[in-house]
Image: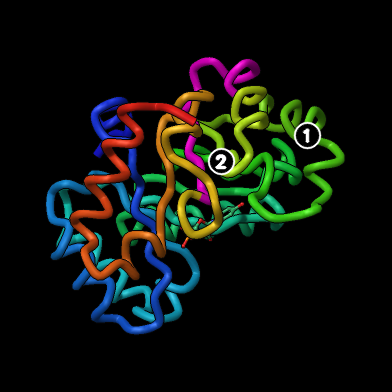
Amino acid sequence: MNIEEIRGRSRVILAIDEEEPRKYWNVLDAVGSSVKAVKLGWMAILSLGSDGVKSLINGHDDKYFIMDAKMADVNFINEKIARRMAGLGFDGIIMHGFIGPSNAPPSVMDVFVLISMTQGPTLYDASLERAMDYTKAIDRRGIVVPGNKPDIIRKAREQFPSDVIISPGIGAQGGSIGCAVKHGADFGIVGRSIYESSDPVESLKRLEREAAESQC
Ligand code: 3DU
């Protein structure tokens, strides 16, 4: 799956960070083909194991899967991790921007570079311009920009006109998907507001509607 195929057609990337393995399958069954992209992270690897994650991805081959590895190691370790994640079926992987181009993995899959976080303060807040400069030197498909900080999304869109911008922090962390899209995000990353909802399908539809309206 190629993210350009879904860019503009769908605005929600479903994040799942559950403890129980069956919940990953349950929420994907519930939302069905309306979700085009899914972000998993270390909770998925810990809960399902790498074989379980591989089966989950194989069982949903209509979706684009991103591994939120938040890689921040040296290059040869990041390369091993990226190759293993590609082997599990992931299409994209997230790395920290502060580690710079010399530590970025080779492009065995799409790389998304995190340039700022939803919660802080972090060093990124003090050095956003530097973080963006480091990121520009990395071979990447897109960037991760906080969905609850519209001004940072706007700055990032100005600096990265063609990157795929994916934005966490929507819903449970206070961000609005409509506002994130209005400021330049391509996708809102949404976890608990969907997988903890009593009606995940309705929550997803509402988020897609808000994204289409793109209002703050
Ligand atoms: O708050 P939610 O349940 O919608 O989950 C947000 C997801 O986005 C979660 O997987 C988390 O690891 C990720 N994320 C952030 O929340 C904040 C960041 O700055 C980067 C990633």
Residue closer to the observer: 173 or 11 = 173
Q: Which of the image's four quarters has the N terminus?
A: top left
For badge 2, the amino acid type reads Val
Read off the residue under disc 1. 128
Color scheme of the displayed model:
rainbow
Q: Is the residue 175 above or below the residue 67 in the image?
A: above
Point out the tag, 1 or 2, that comes first from the N-terminus: 1
Q: Is the residue 114 above or below the residue 193 in the image?
A: above
Residue at 27 percent across and 71 percent down: it is 24
Helix, strand or loop at disc 1?
helix
Location of residue 201 (image quadrant): bottom left
For badge 1, the amino acid type reads Leu
| Mark 1, other Cα within 10 Å: few <14 / some 14–19 / many ≥20 | some
Expressed as whole percent of the image width and height from the top left, the position of residue 147 reads 54, 42
Expressed as whole percent of the image width and height from the top left, the position of residue 189 reads 43, 48
Does the numbered disc 2 mark a residue whose Cβ is under 8 Å from ligand 1?
A: yes
Residue at 24 percent across and 29 percent down: it is 9
Residue range in magenta is 157-169
Q: Is residue 61 magenta?
A: no
Residue at 64 percent across and 54 percent down: it is 76
Residue at 43 percent across and 39 percent down: it is 177
In this rendering, position of residue 153 left or right of residue 127: left
Read off the residue under disc 2. 144
Location of residue 153 (image quadrant): top right
Expressed as whole percent of the image width and height from the top left, the position of residue 50 reads 37, 73
Residue closer to the observer: 40 or 157 = 157
Q: CA distance from mark 1 to mark 2?
A: 13 Å
Expressed as whole percent of the image width and height from the top left, the position of residue 87 reads 35, 58
Residue closer to the observer: 38 or 149 = 149
Residue closer to the observer: 66 or 101 = 66
